[in-house]
Image (cartoon, rainbow, N blue to C red):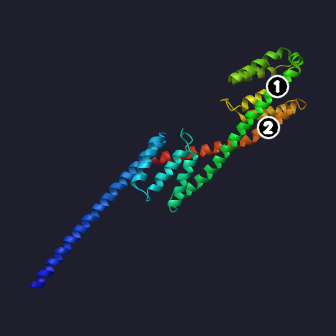
Amino acid sequence: MGRERIRAWKYVYFCVASLIFLSLLSCAVIQERRENKELRSYLQRGQKLLAQRNYDAALEAYQKVLSLSPHKPPEDEALFNMGSAYAHFGNPKKDYKKSIDLFLRVLNDYPESHLSMQARIWVGVLLESTESIKKVERLKETIKNLEKVNQTLKESEKLKQPEARWEEYGEFREHILRGQKFLAQGNYEGAISENKKILSSSDSRSPKDEALFNLGLIFAHFGNPQQDLEKSIEFFKTVIKNNPKSSLAEQAKIWVEILQENAGLNHLLQKLKQVDIEIEEMKRKKTQ
């Protein structure tokens, strides 16, 4: 009889222990689901804000995911999305270095993540883009230096033969002066107009080589909102072709060489921007 009571109590204890275990397990599952729901909520909020180009708020939402889910998914998604935000061409605080670092964290910490391949591609593209930007900056500096050299040469030419030069230009003197004045003031349209007036003249004395050269400079100018390197190259090539004996022909050759390289880099940057746009459009459609 005593043994049966002991067995009964053991059975009761076992049932109670099982109930406690199941209760704790259930609570843990509920808590985990609640946390996952909260994490997903922050991720969705970040994606929505990113689509709205509210970059700071989107980054805050993703940062919340990092604080709630350190060293485990969906931290990989938050890191990836933060990398995308810092790489976005529309972000005024765009930072390719931060973006690369975030994508590298995805690769290093979550090599099995479904986002690892995209992160790898992003790193390659951004590294190439960063190098291209550096080259563009160096080319801009070269352009500035060439403009200074060109201005120095013009001033030197004025000092050597001012009267003969202006006498040769005749009525076109005013167009040249106004064009130079407009360019110095940042009035690119006005400068273009004055130089085109010279090109439209049938007078053989018109300094078409200088007008063409000036148009090349105007369209290459980094401050010109209508900057067009292809047009600039064509104007310089026309100087070389139509005026091979001009004192400006050699300078035009240098400009063509530099601008062709610059145009290639700009084309690459435009392609990268287009990739950004397409990726953002795909993300936007997924969140709808």
Q: CA distance from mark 2 to mark 1?
A: 20 Å
Residue sitting at 30 percent across and 59 percent down? 30
When the figure is inspected, residue 45 is found, relative to residue 117, above or below; the finding is above
Q: Which residue is mark 1?
A: 154
Q: Give the secondary structure at mark 1.
A: helix
Which three-letter amino acid code belongs to the residue tagged 2? Val
Question: Could you say where residue 12 lies in the image, as x and y percent from the top left?
Answer: 16, 74
Q: Quadrant for the N terminus, please.
A: bottom left
Question: Could you say where residue 114 lies in the image, as x and y percent from the top left?
Answer: 50, 59
When the figure is inspected, residue 15 is found, relative to residue 153, above or below; the finding is below
**Mark 2 Cα-neighbour bin, 10 Å: few <14, some 14–19, many ≥20:** many
Q: Give the secondary structure at mark 2.
A: helix
Residue sitting at 51 percent across and 45 percent down? 85
Residue sitting at 83 percent across and 37 percent down? 253
Residue 92 in the figure: left or right of residue 44: right
Question: Could you say where residue 231 lies in the image, as x and y percent from the top left?
Answer: 74, 33
Residue 158 in the figure: left or right of residue 64: right
Q: Which residue is mark 2?
A: 256
Give the mark toward the camera: 2 or 1: 1
The residue lying furthest to the top in this view is 171
Compare residues 36 and 221 and report the one nearer the observer: 221
- Which comes before the other along the chain, label 2 or label 1? 1
Compare residues 155 and 82 and report the one nearer the observer: 155
Occupied quadrant, residue 135: top right
Which three-letter amino acid code belongs to the residue tagged 1? Lys
